[in-house]
Amino acid sequence: MLKKDQVVLLSDWIEQSTSTLFEIKKLDTTVKNFLPGFQKGKEAFSGFEVTRLDSNTIYRFIFIHSQPNEDFQFVIYSHNKKALAELKQIEMIDGHPHLVWKYNPLKRDGLNQERKTYFIKTFGSTTLQIPLPKSSSDVETFFDQLFTLCQNRLEADTIV
């Protein structure tokens, strides 16, 4: 699970990042640590609005405290506040922590197996492993992988 020390470090590195590919705006979490319109009833540790400058694509990255324990989840929202990915699993790969996400469509139209098949055929697997940055200079690569995850998910979700 994603732990508080990882979230604190990652949030700091995102704030310190000097990306030329992404515009990063810290979201205000000062009102009782809640972000209006996001994960009602769950405490947000930090949040960022991230814009990919070459496509003007905007996602919101929110670190949410999973009470009552000390675990956290990292949720990516679209511009209209739809949750695109919830990342909470950490896996050590080659001695470095990676966020692990699995594509699991849950639409009620009977096409979920086709979506999974498309995702595997197009992107290689339904499971993605994204290394956590080792410093603020790695944030740009981290964001690129997160944006790719969201774009792939949205593409697979829209197949008919």
Image (spheres, rainbow, N blue to C red):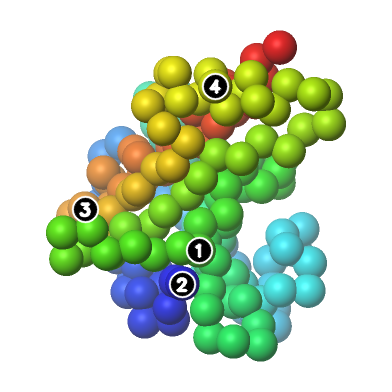
CA gap between label 2 and label 3 equals 21 Å
155 relative to 15 in the view: left or right: right
Contact between marks 1 and 2 (CB within 8 A): the answer is yes
Amino acid at the residue labelled 2: Met
Mark 1: secondary structure: loop
**Residue 83 pos. (x, y %):** 66, 47
45 relative to 145 in the view: left or right: right
Amino acid at the residue labelled 4: Thr
Contact between marks 4 and 3 (CB within 8 A): the answer is no
CA gap between label 3 and label 1 equals 20 Å
Which mark identifies residue 1?
Answer: 2
Q: Nearer the viewer, residue 3 or 80?
A: 3
Residue position for label 1: 88
CA gap between label 4 and label 1 equals 24 Å
Q: How would you rate the neighbour count of disc 3 (Cα within 10 Å): few for under 14, some for 14-19, many for 20 or more?
A: some
Residue position for label 4: 117
Mark 3: secondary structure: helix
**Mark in front: 2 vs 4:** 4
Res 96 visible? yes
**Residue 2 pos. (x, y %):** 44, 71
Contact between marks 2 and 4 (CB within 8 A): the answer is no
Amino acid at the residue labelled 1: Lys
